[in-house]
Image (spheres, grey):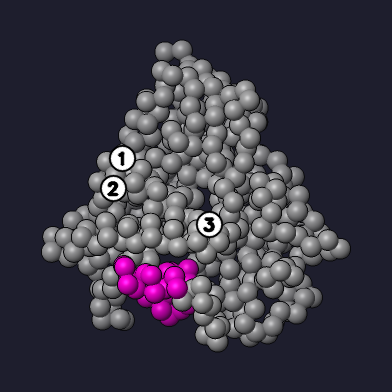
Amino acid sequence: MTNPVNFFSKALQDQPFEAYQHLRQDAPVYQDPSTGIFHVSRFEDVRHVLQNPILFSGKTRHAQDRQTERQARVNELFKTKGWLPTATLIGRDDPNHKQMRALFNEAFRPAKIHAMDGFVQQTAESLFEKIAGVGQCDWVQAMSIPLPLTIIVKQMGADEADLWRIKAWTDAFFKRISMMLTEEEEIECVLMEIEAQHYFQPIFERLRITPDDTLLSDLVNKEIPEWGRTLTDEELHAEMMADTFVGGSETTTNALSAGIKLLIENPSVWEQLKHDTETHLRAFIEEVLRLESPVQMLLRRTTSATELNSVAIPEGALVGVRYGAANRCEGQFSCPADLRLDRDKPGAHLAFGSGIHHCLGAPLARRELWWGFKTFIDRVDSAQFTPGANDFSYQPHCLLRALTSLQIDFQLKSP
């Protein structure tokens, strides 16, 4: 490509898909001159990276990397005021990853997800009831945030009354991994995370004495056989932010927001859904996930020199796995920018990853999306963006795609 792509540009993050198209066509493996990261954008190449974890490691902090002074200050702050988080599941390789993931697989077993379905439905309907008589809301604040966050708060043994306090802590972690902060901003986020650690530490200790049926109780108390121990506090605190609250709520939040925006923009699709929700809703959910890809990118590190799409990638290089670009790849999907409910394999996208790091919370996320969208479709006859109230901007972030707000006016169906 003749012009470099600025992945840190707010304009690109708000509207990345044209740039992704240029990358797929002209530079499917593109080395960012400012960071050295090799960005991979075509579907087959992304899937190749994800399904070859030995060559493309989750350990993105290379053993030979020199710790920056900034990172050292952040680590010291965690150590002195809280707990220094260890590597999360996404940052581990097999066999260590497989051994730890077995613990999460047990916590997210299908029977447990099925048992939560009634609570998910009840939560969605209760949240909608609060806005039903108003006819106007910020959908992000009213539904997208509290629906998945309420579910995960319950599973983490926290008090639902603390939901928005927990959201502030989750936002701090969300911002810290954005790759967009100054050191001063990062320190502010770390202090917020440490505040969250001191909130959850007594819950860990209570569950060790009195286990219950929550997901967190399983994570606290179940021993990993190969390790001969349960998770440490440092491991638990890392998982709380990364894989439970951000992985388990933030990404679903972003899909819930994107889906309502797409419904309003595609009235013919909405008519199909209203006519036969049970038949079409699953396909709609998969299209929202494909088109918007709440996780736009994650990083991998090469363990040896390799070549991808005729581009040489040296050992130890960082590789940006661009889910958001791959899910609109012309070589994989016909009319990739269109929202279609008749695709042969609606779930054949990479929004939840692929290979050993495939998102273990995907079944729960799909149930939350089902009830969030179904509640809207069942109750709302028509909706439109509130005139002059939306700029459709996204949070500045290099990894995730999060709509800031979505102001809508809606009319309920007749009783």
User: Which numbered marker is on residue 162?
Assistant: none
Q: Residue furthest right?
A: 2
Q: Name the residue under label 3.
A: 352
In front: label 2 or label 3:
2
Give the labeled residue for mark 1: 119
Please state the extent of the stretch shown in magenta in the rendering.
73-99
Q: Quadrant of the C terminus?
A: top left
Residue 381 vs residue 15: left or right? left
Q: Which of 67 and 95 is in front in this view?
A: 67
Amino acid type at image mark 2: Lys
| Above or below: residue 381 compared with residue 23 | above
Q: Please state, as top left, top right, bottom left or bottom right, where the N terminus lies in the image.
A: bottom right
- Residue pushed farthest front? 184
Residue positioned 43% across, 80% down in the render: 95
Mark 2 or mark 1, whichever is nearer to me: 2
**Closest to the observer, 340 or 361:** 361
In the rendered image, residue 293, in percent from the top left (x then y), is placed at 59, 51
Label 2 SS = helix
Q: Where is residue 216 in the image (x, y as percent from the top left)?
A: 27, 59
Q: Which of marks 2 and 1 is nearer the N terminus?
A: 1
**144 falls in the magenta region:** no
- 342 and 349: which is toward the camera: 349
Where 367 sits versus 317, above or below? above
Q: What residue type is labelled 3?
A: Phe
Crowding at dot 1, Cα within 10 Å, few <14 / some 14-19 / many 20+, comes out as some
**The label number, if any, that marks residue 154 in the structure image:** 2
Residue projecting furthest to the left:
209
The residue positioned farthest toward the top in the image shown: 414
* Disc 3 to disc 1, C-alpha distance: 23 Å
Among the 4 quarters of the image, the one containing residue 129: top left
What amino acid is at disc 1?
A: Phe
Q: Residue visible at 73% across and 55% down?
A: 20
